[in-house]
Structures are given as structure tokens and as C-alpha cells.
């Protein structure tokens, strides 16, 4: 699903260059649930942004679903993001003037789906994340956990192949964090690939595979043997 | 264009800072409002002045005689000469471009005291000898009776067509003047018509309402003018410049009266066409100035809108970043911002347009009706086409105002926009 070969990325910081990614090789298959860890500045967010087509890489080959991504113009990138990728952010990034159902329906709006139809679909996804009763509420009227579930519903509505989550639990308490992770797991079981950037060990341990970045290189990449501890399930329920 | 989400977004973005939006919109509102008021006033001024010209034939030239300034064919300089009756036919025969030839004779003015008497009433009025053609050069309304006709000329009838003021002075209120006699300089004339002038801004000394038209030939004979013609009014055929008949008539008349061809002073003339063109040019100039000033004011407003759109786009950087992350294409984002700008500009401008037109209409309605055509301001109106044009200008300038902010919005990479705080 995602194939990275020797990916480099650097930023111009005035006179000197900041080399953030120094040759990343990574393969993520379909249906995997992977967490990316690393200290701040290790390049984990940059990596996620490149995979999410929000940023370009400087060097190396990047295949998304078998498609070589190179020199993409913004219009094409926007369309691919819309169809292939769902985003979940630490700060939720909901549109403040749209209510819950409109926020969820927004990706379909950019696909040109008629309002009635996309709102109907959005209601189905709201039901999946348990927010049916909050459909007409604005984001400002929701709690942090509800906002993140709303964001997840929005990420799922265009039926993407990949969901990219950048510190999805960073702004949540531990109980709601577990609820959100439980939701991700359910989504993952339907065959969608999920990449989660996090610096919390217990969050990472809920995924099947943990990749650790250090100074722009992959430090370790191992399968997580006990990714579904019983006590976590008990909390989630 | 008409989907709800687009308008919801526009409303949300504009209503976030309502005072700012209103103040910005006011710039465009005022620009269009001023343009409409100025255009309306300009048209009012033009209508007023042009109405004063009434139906006066503007393709006309008037010619009279003056003392010669050059000795010629044994005749001295400073010689006085007169046009004669046979000049009328000569002009008609030799200048095919002529449409009308109307000779006129001024028979004793009002300056010499009360020259017109009826019973115990008297007044001082201008007396003119005219051909029927005069009514096509300086047309009048004839609410009672008729104007001079060809038979009056041929039979030298002692009839008179009197102005409204003459009627008021010499007759009782509601008295029928037709068939009654008045005495002009001691000779009785039968009144056959009463006229009111169609215009007052064009006259030949004195109030037209205080004048009397007699048949040209009658006046010549009754007051011993022989075959002298006072002056000529000439008009050109449609499409022929008045200057051509002016030159030809001058040459012909000089030749017939033994005036040196190079004598520029012997024939006095007034080319109304030239004056009229100058006046039309003046109004074109005024109207051009109005547009320049109006468009300038409008542009100032539009630049204000563009500025505020830039601020709005900057404030919404993160929001736009989110939208782009979940699939809004650059053209969609640009379209959204341009629509917003066009909407704001058009709404504000339309407000100014409506208010401007309403005020002009109000002025038009409450403007006192001009009596006897003496006015400098009449029927201020705004052409419907001009209003449509102004709206088009608004839409286009709104789009231009939105273009720079829209480009700014998509020039930032989505990732930078997302990180923006």
C-alpha cells in the first residue's frame, strides 16, 4: 500500500539546510495498523505529511497503492488526498462554522456529491462513531473525545485506503484516548491501513507494528506481539 | 454556484467581523452611489440645457449685413448694404444643399415705447416679419389659431400671430383673440394665432412671448421697407455640414452685393451648428469626467475589498489548510474566495445603485415643472443600460479584487497552512 525507498527531505532554514529525513525505506501493506514513534524533531510528522501528500519529498521513490508519486500538482494531490487518504489531527481541525454532520460530509462535498445524499451518508458514519444525537451540534459544543470521533468519521466517509493520524490522542485524556484507539481498531479490521504518529508508548502498543524514528532514519521496526492487551479492552468497553 | 455550503462559508467568513465587513462594503457602496448621483445630475443638466434649445433647428446659420471693411469695384469701405428679396430666390437656386431659407425683417422694436395698442390697452413688443419656414427653424406651439402661411405671404395679408404675453396684455382673461384687431405702429392687423415658444434659451433679444409675427411681405410693404431683407436663417439638408452652406451663402451674397471676396467683416453670421457641437462636446466632457471620478471612487472601494479579503484569507489560513487537506482543490478554494469578493462587491454596489437611482428619481419627481421652458436642470435620469453597465463593472471588479487574495490562499502549501496559528 505504501512503499518508500530512500526518501530524503530537507527544509531551507535561511542560509543552512535542515535535513529532516535522511533516507527512509518503508513498506506498509494493506490492512496494517502501524504506529510511528520518535522524539520531537525525529521527522515523524514530516514522514506522515509526505505520505499524506501534504508535502513533497526531495529524493527517493514513493509509491502509494502502486502509483509513483512525483512532481504532483496541487489539484491532483487534492484529489488523491480526497479519495485515498483520511486525516486525523491532534487538534481535530474541524470547521468551526459547520455542524457535525456537515463536517463529516465535507470530503464528499469536494467530490461533488449532492447535499442530501452526502448528509445521509454522513449520518451513517456519525452513527458508527456514536454521535447520531449530536449531528446538528457545532464542534464548539462537543467534548474533545467527541470532536476526535467526529474527525475520524470525516476521515472515513470517502472510504479511503489509508487513514493517517498525527498524535490523535495528544489532546485527550486516557479514557477517551482508549475509546478513540478502539475506534481505530474497528476501522482497521474493515481493511483500512492506519498510520498513527504518537509519542505515547501505551498508544503505540495498541498497534500491530511500531516504527521508531531517530534523527531522520528508521531506528527500529518491529511487530508488536501483544498489541491487544485485555485490560485495555476492559477500559474501552 | 448556488450550493448551500458555499454560501454558508461566505456568510460565516463575512459575519465573523460584521463591522469590518460593513465598513469595507461602504467604500464600494459610496463609489457606486456617487457615480449614480453624478450621472443623474449630469443628465439633468444636459436635459435642462437641451430642453431650453427645444426643437430649435441646430443645423442652422444666421446671416446679417455689416459695413464693408475693404474697398471693392470702386465702392468705398464702410459701405452699408442690405439683402434684397431677389437674394431669397438666388440662394435657393444656387445652393442645392439648402433645406430652408427663412428671411426675416425686424419691424421696429419695443425700445421705442408702447408700439402695440388695442382699445385702452397697450404694450411694447418686438415685431418680426417672417416666412412660414420660420416655424420649422424655431418652432412654436400654437394653441389658438395658426401660424403665418404661404397665402399670407403672397397676398400680403395684414394678419398677426401674437405671443402669449402679448395676448395676456392686450386681451381680457379667457377672451378669444382670433379675428380681433390690434394696432401695430398705427396700422391695424387681424390676430390669426397665439403662440407659446417651445424654448427660451435660444432667442434673438427679448422674450419670445413678448413678440409678434407678421407675414414678411406685409411688414415690408406696410412699414416701407421696400424689398429689404433683415437677415437670413438658413438650414442645411440632413447630413450636410452647416459650414458648407455657410461658406457658399457667404460667397454668393458677397458676389451679389459687390463685397470683396476676402472681406470677412461685411457679413455677420452665427453658425448654431458649431455652437451646438461645442455644447455637445462640453456635455461629453462632463460625462467623461463623471465616469473618471466615479470609477476612481469605485476603484478605491474595490481596493478596500481586496485588502479586507487578504486579511480574511490570512485569518482563515488554517481553515483553508484543513479544507485542502481533506480534498478541496486549489480552483475550488479560489472560486470560493472570488465568489465571496464578488458577492460583497455586488451586494454593496447594488445597494449604492438602488439608493442612487431612488434619490435621482425622488429629485426628478419633486422637481418643479419648468414654466415656459426656462430651466437649467430637468429630468435627471439614469439610463437603464448605464445601470446594467455599472453592475457589470462591479462584478468584474469584484472578481479582480478577489483574485489576489485567492491566489494568496492557494500559494501557501497545505501543510504550512495547517501549521499556521
Image: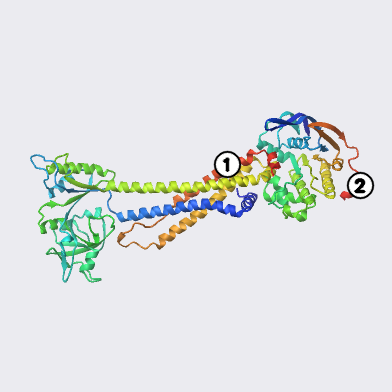
Secondary structure type for disc 1: helix
Please give left or right for residue A162 compared with residue B88 in the image: right
Give B174 or A74, whichever is nearer the viewer: A74
Q: CA distance from mark 2 to mark 1?
A: 56 Å
Location of residue B147 in the rendering, given as x and y in whole percent from the top left corner: 22, 59
The reply, left or right, for residue B29 in relation to residue B113 is right
Q: Nearer the viewer, residue B86 or B330?
A: B330
Kindly identify which chain the residue marked by label 2 belongs to: A
Q: Number of numbered discs present? A: 2
Residue B17 is marked as none
Q: Is residue B41 visible?
A: yes
Residue A140 relative to residue B109: left or right: right
Quarter of the image with the C terminus of chain B in it:
top right
Q: Is B266 situated left or right of A190 in this image?
A: left
* Residue that carries the numbered disc 2 in the rendered image: A231
Camera-nearest label, 2 or 1: 1
Which colour scheme appears in the figure? rainbow
Residue nearest the viewer, comparing A85 with B281: B281
For residue B404, which numbered disc appears in the image? 1
Residue B394, percent from left and from top:
51, 48
**Host chain of mark 1:** B
Give the x, y percent position of residue B195. Answer: 24, 62
Vertical position of residue A31 compared to residue B271: above or below: above
Q: Residue furthest left?
A: B74
Judged from the image, the secondary structure of the residue bearing numbered disc 2 is helix
Amino acid at each position: 500500500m505504501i512503499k518508500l525507498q530512500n526518501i530524503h527531505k530537507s527544509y531551507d532554514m535561511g542560509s543552512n539546510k535542515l535535513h529532516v529525513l535522511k533516507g527512509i525505506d518503508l513498506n506498509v501493506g494493506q490492512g496494517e495498523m502501524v504506529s510511528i514513534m520518535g522524539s520531537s524533531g525525529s521527522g515523524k510528522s514530516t514522514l506522515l505529511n509526505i505520505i499524506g501528500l501534504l508535502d513533497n519529498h526531495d529524493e527517493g521513490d514513493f509509491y502509494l497503492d502502486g502509483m509513483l508519486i512525483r512532481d504532483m500538482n496541487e489539484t491532483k494531490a487534492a484529489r488523491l488526498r480526497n479519495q485515498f487518504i483520511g486525516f486525523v489531527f491532534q487538534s481535530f481541525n474541524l470547521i468551526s462554522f459547520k455542524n457535525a454532520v456537515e463536517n463529516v460530509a465535507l470530503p464528499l462535498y469536494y467530490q461533488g456529491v449532492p447535499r442530501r445524499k452526502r448528509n445521509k451518508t454522513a449520518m451513517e458514519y456519525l452513527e458508527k462513531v456514536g454521535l447520531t444525537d449530536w449531528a446538528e451540534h457545532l464542534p464548539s459544543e462537543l467534548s474533545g473525545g467527541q470532536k476526535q470521533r467526529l474527525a475520524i468519521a470525516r476521515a472515513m466517509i470517502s472510504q479511503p485506503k489509508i487513514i493517517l493520524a498525527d498524535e490523535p490522542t495528544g489532546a485527550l485524556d486516557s479514557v477517551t484516548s482508549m475509546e478513540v484507539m478502539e475506534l481505530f481498531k474497528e476501522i482497521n479490521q474493515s481493511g483500512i491501513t492506519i498510520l498513527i504518529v504518537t509519542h505515547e508508548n501505551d498508544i503505540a502498543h495498541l498497534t500491530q507494528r511500531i516504527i521508531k524514528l531517530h534523527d531522520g532514519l528508521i531506528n527500529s521496526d518491529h511487530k508488536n506481539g501483544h498489541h491487544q492487551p485485555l485490560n485495555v479492552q476492559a477500559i474501552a468497553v | 454556484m448556488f450550493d448551500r455550503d458555499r454560501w454558508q462559508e461566505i456568510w460565516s467568513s463575512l459575519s465573523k467581523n460584521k463591522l469590518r465587513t460593513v465598513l469595507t462594503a461602504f467604500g464600494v457602496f459610496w463609489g457606486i452611489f456617487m457615480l449614480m448621483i453624478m450621472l443623474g445630475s449630469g443628465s439633468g443638466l444636459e436635459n435642462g440645457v437641451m430642453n431650453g434649445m427645444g426643437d430649435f433647428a441646430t443645423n442652422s446659420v444666421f446671416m446679417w449685413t455689416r459695413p464693408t471693411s475693404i474697398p471693392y469695384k470702386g465702392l468705398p469701405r464702410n459701405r452699408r448694404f442690405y439683402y434684397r428679396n431677389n437674394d431669397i430666390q438666388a440662394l435657393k437656386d444656387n445652393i442645392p444643399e439648402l433645406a430652408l431659407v427663412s428671411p426675416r425683417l425686424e419691424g421696429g422694436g419695443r425700445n421705442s415705447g408702447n408700439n402695440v395698442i388695442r382699445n385702452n390697452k397697450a404694450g411694447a413688443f418686438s415685431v418680426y416679419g417672417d416666412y412660414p419656414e420660420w416655424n420649422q427653424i424655431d418652432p412654436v406651439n400654437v394653441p389658438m389659431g395658426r401660424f403665418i402661411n404661404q397665402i399670407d405671404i403672397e397676398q400680403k395679408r395684414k394678419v398677426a400671430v401674437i405671443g402669449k404675453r402679448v395676448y395676456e396684455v392686450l386681451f381680457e382673461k379667457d377672451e378669444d383673440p382670433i379675428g380681433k384687431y390690434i394696432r401695430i405702429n398705427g396700422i391695424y392687423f387681424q390676430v390669426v394665432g397665439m403662440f407659446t415658444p417651445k424654448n427660451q434659451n435660444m432667442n434673438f433679444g427679448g422674450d419670445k412671448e413678448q413678440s409678434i409675427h407678421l407675414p414678411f411681405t406685409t411688414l415690408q410693404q406696410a412699414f416701407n421697407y421696400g424689398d429689404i431683407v433683415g437677415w437670413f436663417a438658413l438650414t442645411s439638408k440632413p447630413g450636410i455640414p452647416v459650414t458648407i452652406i455657410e461658406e457658399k451663402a457667404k460667397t454668393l451674397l458677397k458676389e451679389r452685393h459687390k463685397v470683396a471676396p476676402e472681406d470677412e467683416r461685411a457679413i455677420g453670421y452665427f453658425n448654431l451648428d458649431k455652437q451646438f457641437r461645442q455644447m455637445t462636446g462640453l456635455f461629453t466632457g462632463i460625462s467623461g469626467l463623471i465616469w473618471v471620478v466615479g470609477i476612481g471612487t469605485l476603484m478605491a472601494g474595490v481596493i478596500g475589498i481586496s485588502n479586507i479579503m487578504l486579511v480574511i484569507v490570512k485569518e482563515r489560513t488554517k481553515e483553508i489548510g484543513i479544507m485542502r487537506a481533506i480534498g478541496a482543490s486549489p480552483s475550488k478554494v479560489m472560486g470560493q474566495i472570488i465568489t465571496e469578493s464578488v458577492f460583497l462587491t455586488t451586494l454593496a454596489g447594488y445597494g449604492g445603485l438602488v439608493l442612487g437611482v431612488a434619490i435621482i428619481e425622488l429629485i426628478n419627481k419633486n422637481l418643479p415643472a419648468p414654466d415656459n421652458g426656462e430651466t437649467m436642470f430637468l429630468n435627471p435620469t439614469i439610463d437603464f443600460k448605464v445601470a446594467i453597465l455599472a453592475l457589470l463593472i462591479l462584478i468584474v471588479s469584484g472578481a479582480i479584487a478577489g483574485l489576489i487574495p485567492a491566489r494568496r490562499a492557494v500559494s501557501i502549501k497545505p501543510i504550512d497552512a495547517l501549521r499556521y496559528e
